[in-house]
Structures are given as structure tokens and as C-alpha cells.
Amino acid sequence: MKIKKQVAVGLFSMASIFTLSQVAASADTKVTVKSGDTLYRIATKYHTTVSTLAKANHLKDINTIVTGSQLTVPSKTSLTSSSSTKAKKYTTGKTYTGVKKQTTSTYVSPSTKNKNQSSTKSVKKAAAKSTFTSSIKTAGTTANTTGVVGLAQQLTTQSIPYQWGGTTTKGFDCSGLVQYVYKQNGVSLPRTAEAQAEATTYESVSDAQPGDLLFWGSKGGVYHSAIYIGNNQYVNAPEPGKTVQTQTISPYFAPSFAGEVS
């Protein structure tokens, strides 16, 4: 009886240890912010993403974290549980529906040929005008895109520091840089990252074209914006202590969605 009792107690102890280890493994981690820490550094250290930390701690500005404050680093179990609820798709700005081209063929009898000739000429003139207008718009868009990308890249060579609320070449924050670059190319954009998102046409990051904007966060909580320049790269004013620079999209700091500036 004593042996059976000892075995039972041993099994109970092992089960308790296993249960406790499961709880410990699934617990969130509390991190105290130290001087010089950034959200990106903390995310990299704990193998998570900046957006995950921002969402878990309800941060609207990823560039401002207070020394001595505590941040929660969600466990993988918490992330799996929260991701089971599908988030609503962020939609903003204008939406465009693709229309398939249609080709029609009509037989014209000799008796109606003369009547239809004038109509045909009108259609051709309208088509020619439409093509001309379209080509002007395309040329304008191409020129504007080239100007935006070119200026953004140029600013990365000038060692312009990050500055909270900065809107000039003396210092930029993320949305200040975006606003400045587009303003120099004749396009007026709002001041904040959230307002800039609302002023663009939503698209996925994979569909982004050079000159489009990239956003981090969700509707009502966009906390960072940047200018996409192609080849999986973007120009932005990242955080205090850094300058305007080109960065590559990475899993640790991936944009949530993109926006086309109309």
C-alpha cells in the first residue's frame, strides 16, 4: 500500500510540475523599458513584431515609449488565441472596380450605311479624345511617381534626423516626411499618418507600386507611414536617434496595408 501511495504521490507531483510549466510557457512576458530602448529593439529581442507589441500595449505612436514603464510581450499561445478571431478588412478612400473590355460587331445594311456614317465618326472622335485624355493622365501619374520616389531617395542622403512633429528638412517625423515629399510634387496630404491613410485608396502591400504609401496599424490606430519605392523597400523617418532612410520590409516590422494616392 505504501508503494502504491508513493507512486500516486509521485505521479501527482509530476503532473503538477507539467501543468505549471505549461502555464509558465503560455504566460505573457513583462518587460521594463530601459533608457535607449526602442520598440523595434524589444521586438527583435523577444522574436515578435513591432505591430504586435503596439497592439498588445495599445500604443498609437511606436516612436514614444517611456523609460521605466512596463510593456507586455504576448506569448505565442496568446497570439494564436487572438488571431482566431478574424479581423475586419481595413477599407478607406476610393475603391475601383475593374471593367472588362467588350467588343461588339454590327452588320450595316446598304440602306442604313449613310445614316450610320456620321454616328461612326462621332464615336471615333469620342474614342480619340478619351485616348488622348487617358494618355495625359498616365503621363502625369508617371511623372508624379518619379518625382515622389526621386525626392524621397534624395532625402535619405542628407542625414535628416527624426524629430517629433517635424515637417521640414531640419527634421521629420514619419507623416511629416510623407506630407513634405508629396507637397513638393504638387499633392496635398493630411498631417497625420491616420489621416493620410483615410486620404488614400486601400490596397494590399503586395499590390503596392512605387510612390504608394505604406501604413502600420489598423483603422483608427495607424501609427506609422512611409513611401514605397519598389523592390520591397520604403523610405521613412523611423524613430528618435535615426535619420531619414531606406529600409526593407521585414517580418519584424511589416506594414499592415498600402494606400494609393489619387
Image: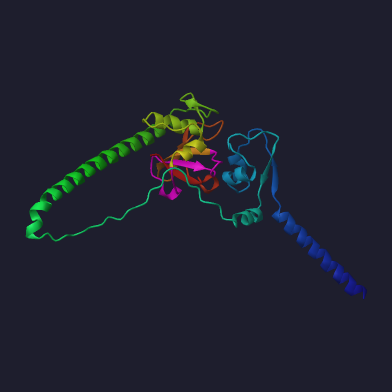
Q: Residue 40: give x, y in percent of width and height.
A: 58, 41
Tell me how the rendering is colored. rainbow
Q: Quadrant of the N terminus?
A: bottom right
Residue at 26% across, 38% down: 136
- Who is closer to the viewer here, 171 or 207? 207
Which residue is at 89% across, 70% downward?
6
Please say whether residue 55 is one of the residues in the magenta stretch: no
> What are the residue bounds of the magenta stretch?
201-223
Which quarter of the figure has residue 63?
Answer: top right
Residue 205: say if magenta. Answer: yes
Instruction: Reply above or below: 208 against 108.
Output: above
Horizontal side, residue 73 vs residue 218: left or right: right
> 215 or 201, which lies in front?
201
Residue 215 point in image, percent of width and height: 49, 42
Above-or-below relation of 158 to 250 = above
- Give me the residue at 65% from left, 49% from top: 74
Of residues 200 and 19, the one drawn nearer to the viewer in this rendering: 200
**Quarter of the C terminus within the rendering:** top left
User: Which residue lies most toward the right here?
Assistant: 2
